[in-house]
Amino acid sequence: MGIVNVPLGNRSYDIRIGTGLLARLGAECARLGLGTRCAVISDTNVAPRYGKTAQTALAKAAFAPTLITIPAGERAKSLKTVEACYNQLAAQRLERQSFVVALGGGVVGDLAGFVAATYLRGVAFVQVPTTLLAQVDSSVGGKVGLNLKAGKNLVGAFYQPRLVLCDLNTLTSLPMREFRAGLSEVIKYGIIYDATLFQRLERDLPKLLRREPRTLAAVVARCCEIKAEVVRQDETESGLRATLNFGHTIGHALEAISHYGRYLHGEAIAIGQVAAAKLSAQVLGLPAREVDRIESLFQRAGLPTQARLNTPQRQKLLAAMRLDKKVSGGEIKFVLAHRIGSVKFGQRVPSRLIEQTLNPQPSTPNP
Ligand SMILES: NC(=O)c1ccc[n+]([C@@H]2O[C@H](COP(=O)([O-])OP(=O)(O)OC[C@H]3O[C@@H](n4cnc5c(N)ncnc54)[C@H](O)[C@@H]3O)[C@@H](O)[C@H]2O)c1
Ligand SMILES: [Zn+2]
């Protein structure tokens, strides 16, 4: 089993990575000295597969678990679902010493984390991420929250879990498209922080796509280490943590203009990262060869690298980028790379350059 510590003083916690860890959930929670009653929050895809193993493991360690199942999908990340969860926690008489386990992907993690952060002004919280995206990204770092009609993740908190348990066996049932979408965040860590990881991904991609446990364990652990290090240095995103948004300015805007229907998050940010690499070449001198390596790794991972947009769609995309909550003072700032493994945040990019990058057709010479 791999262990990565997230060092945040008295809120420090471990991320445990390995196969078969779900069956050890109770034993791991017992080490934290948590109260007896607990709630496992999961969704309609994950609960039927893994809910029972989680409950049995908790009961074996003398906990009294109750299972709360929410609908699968992004729409469940709502105040309505939060209220339904509060009511069930109250009905089960969860008290201050009780705890909440998030068993599922990023949706369950964000929602259950928000519930834990606010129920009785905060109860302990354990993450058991079951998607690749959740294992390498959303379960680590303590951002929890939900969506409003006005936009995604507009309500939330920084609330760290007490433990993150990544059971790689749960990834075996993940649909291939979701797995590839998770790889998009994995590749991101290589670009923003670790050229050796990027090389390793170039070499081991076939094994990863087969979900070979040893390769997966090493890669998930490295991604968690990087996220932990970034969060240690900048928990509340006043600087460095912003580098995790590489490819996300364009990616989020693409998700928004397609009404979150066409692309999975990982797909949208694959397109966003390739565009950001091209902008990086122009603004920071990222070598053309490295742009090609980035584009080709996303392609080999089966991710989209370009959105075909007409002129009105491009205008919409630019408008959506200006609306992004990370924009301050109306200026779009990018995370850009000067080489693979090293990025700078807060880079200003002229709109003209963004448009050109999104519209890569060669200009027709005048007759
Ligand atoms: N808090 C953060 O720092 C952070 C970071 C990145 C993303 N997020 C959030 O995470 C969410 C996306 O997370 P996601 O991609 O995990 O989506 P998700 O939770 O919707 O999971 C994707 C799909 O896979 C299903 N699923 C999950 N685990 C499975 C398994 N083991 N086997 C079979 N099916 C399984 C789910 O039911 C769902 O249908 C978004 O809401 C995003 O805003 C949060
Ligand atoms: Zn992301």
Image (cartoon, rainbow, N blue to C red):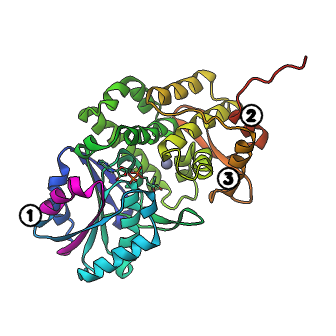
Whether the residue carrying mark 3 lies under 8 Å from ligand 2 is answered with: no
Q: Is residue 216 above or below residue 109?
A: above
| Dot 3 crowding, Cα within 10 Å, few <14, some 14–19, many 20+ | some
Q: Is residue 291 above or below residue 355?
A: above
**Sequence-wise first label, 1 or 3:** 1
Image point 57% across, 59% down: which residue?
Answer: 238
Image point 74% across, 46% down: which residue?
Answer: 315
Labels 1 & 3 near each other (Cβ < 8 A): no
Q: The residue tagged with tag 2: helix, strand or loop?
A: helix
Q: The residue tagged with tag 1: helix, strand or loop?
A: helix
Answer left or right for 56 relative to 286: left
- Residue 356 is marked as 2
Q: Would you name the residue on which mark 3 appears? A: 320
| Amino acid type, callout 2 | Gln
Whether residue 45 is in magenta: the answer is yes
x then y, percent, for residue 295: 54, 28
| Amino acid type, callout 3 | Ala
Q: Would you name the residue on which mark 1 appears? A: 60
